[in-house]
Image (spheres, helix red, strand yellow):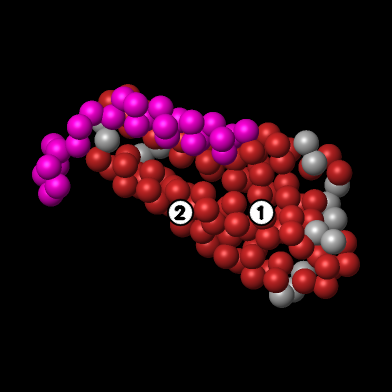
Amino acid sequence: MNHRSTLLAAGLLGATGVAFGAFGAHALRAGLLERGTTLAWETAARYQLLHAAALLGAAAWLRLAGGEAQRRVGWAARCWCVGSVLFSGSLYGLAAGGPRWLGPVTPCGGVALLAGWLCLGAAACVQEKSPEPGIRG
């Protein structure tokens, strides 16, 4: 992933995270309370928004990084995108009364989110010293 596609993903995840959060707090509030799934919905929105913000940082790093660090940050961004869709998406579905087969999807998404953070840490291990501020190579 390059910095532009990562910014696009951050924007999409951020916008849909806000929309789903508001939808759960207002339009679906009664149904979520009745099913006792409000916390699951809120967790989905929180994780989605957190990873949208993380993608913003990844986009900035992608713009400046090169070589192996750039490759690893790109994988972090991919993992966060897939993980957000699987983790948050399955929680939204389950909270709204969706099919039970969504249950095993949630931990798969969680593993992808964790893998993204590990990729980010791995990128830090190979990142070469950054140029002086304001100097791009």
> What is the quadrant of residue 62 in the picture?
top left
Rendering coords of residue 14 (x, y %): 51, 58
**Res. 87 image quadrant:** top right
Vertical position of residue 40 compared to residue 136: above or below: below
Residue sitting nearer the eye, 121 or 80: 121
Please determine whether, in this image, residue 32 is positioned above or below residue 40. Answer: below
Label 2's element?
helix
Residue of label 1: 44
Query: In whole angstroms, how far apart are the C-alphas of marks 2 and 1?
Result: 14 Å
Q: Residue at x 77, y 71 (%)?
A: 29
Q: Is residue 131 magenta?
A: yes
Residue 5, how many percent across, how many down?
Answer: 41, 45
Q: Which residues are magenta?
A: 111-137
Horizontal and vertical percent position of residue 26: 71, 75
- Secondary structure type for disc 1: helix
Q: Is residue 102 left or right of residue 64?
A: right
Residue at 59% in and 45% down:
84
Q: Quadrant of the N terminus?
A: top left
- Under mark 1, the amino acid is Ala
Q: Which mark is residue 53?
A: 2
Q: Is residue 128 visible?
A: yes
Q: Is residue 13 visible?
A: no
Label ID, residue 99 = none
Given contact means CB atoms under 8 Å apart, are the residues at marks 2 and 1 in contact? Answer: no
User: Measuring 25% from the left and 40% from the top, which residue is drawn there?
Assistant: 64
30 relative to 112, above or below: below
From this view, report whether residue 28 is shown above or below residue 59: below
Q: Name the residue type under label 2.
A: Ala
Q: Nearer the viewer, residue 19 or 112?
A: 112
